[in-house]
Image: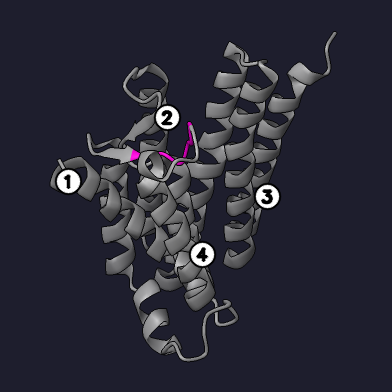
Amino acid sequence: MSIKKHIPNTITCMNMACGCIAVVMAFQGNFIWSAIYILLAAVFDFFDGMVARLLNVKSDIGKELDSLSDAVSFGLAPAAIIYNLLRSIMGDDSCLPYLAFLLAIFSGLRLAKFNVDERQTSSFIGLPTPANAMFMSSLAALSDPIAPIPGWFDVEVIHDIVTSPIVILCLVFLFSYLLVCELPMFSLKFKNLKWEDNKIRFILIISSVVLAAIFQMAAIPLIIILFILMSIYTAFVKR
């Protein structure tokens, strides 16, 4: 039995393992580490498909395993983070924190649609679940006073924004919609390294590096917002 055919699935399992740990961290109130593990899960999610293509060992079971792992890491994990953030703000008596699990439900719908939608071979229809998970988890992480953000930021203003139940719930509804909407979004898959063919991808990557250098952890939600705006531009304005 060839070992190489199990390498992509092993990487996918690492994605799921990171998602499981992120859930545990969320219920412990450690949102920074939850966000870190979701980021690691996204790295594994990026490389499992790439390795499968390089080794030419793509399989149906790998596709199903990838969706199951994504449902944990990019569906359940961010929902658990937002649930615990809202519960810490609103108390155990409120039922509103349970609305956070809309993220898990709509992520599941997004993944199911992706598996049967033949239009999404080289791009996306709707917000990818890793982008949604990184946005939500990084916002929760910014509620922690020790979150790595620039000293010139007004920490109190950021804390007030990311701990506002109204803001959080509005974002839950908005991003749940974005997950399943018909908005075309570009992917970071490169067929070649030509500037003309990948201009939008190169701009996003360069902008992400600059934002990360300036805003540190606060750059993550900004990068996701930039990705959404650039997708809207390429889908409608540039057309």
Instruction: Say if mark 4 contacts mark 3, CB within 8 Å.
Output: no
Residue found 43% across the figure and 57% down from its top: 135
Of the two numbered discs 4 and 2 on the same chain, state the one appearing first in sequence.
2
Q: Nearer the viewer, mark 2 or mark 3?
A: 2
Which is more N-terminal, label 2 or label 1? 2
The residue at which mark 4 appears reads as: 209
Q: Residue at x 23, y 45 (%)?
A: 234
Q: Along the polypeptide, which appears first: circle 2 or circle 3?
A: 3
Q: Give the amino acid type for the residue marked by disc 2 in the picture.
A: Leu
Amino acid found under the numbered disc labelled 3: Ile
| Stretch of the chain drawn in magenta | 186-191
Q: CA distance from mark 3 to mark 1?
A: 41 Å
Residue named by callout 1: 238
> Predominant secondary structure in magenta?
loop
Which residue matches tag 2? 111
Circle 3 residue: 21
Mark 1 to mark 4: distance in Å? 24 Å
In the rendered image, residue 236 lying in the magenta stretch gets the answer: no
Q: What amino acid type should be assigned to the residue bearing mark 4? A: Val
> Relative to 200, is 55 on the left or the right?
right
Q: State how far apart marks 2 and 3 are (Cα).
A: 21 Å
Q: Nearer the viewer, mark 1 or mark 2?
A: 1
Question: Which SS class for mark 4?
Answer: helix
- Which badge, 1 or 4, comes first in the chain's sequence? 4
Indicate the secondary structure of the residue bearing disc 3. helix
Q: Secondary structure at mark 2?
A: helix
Task: Decide whether residue 189 is among the magenta residues.
Answer: yes
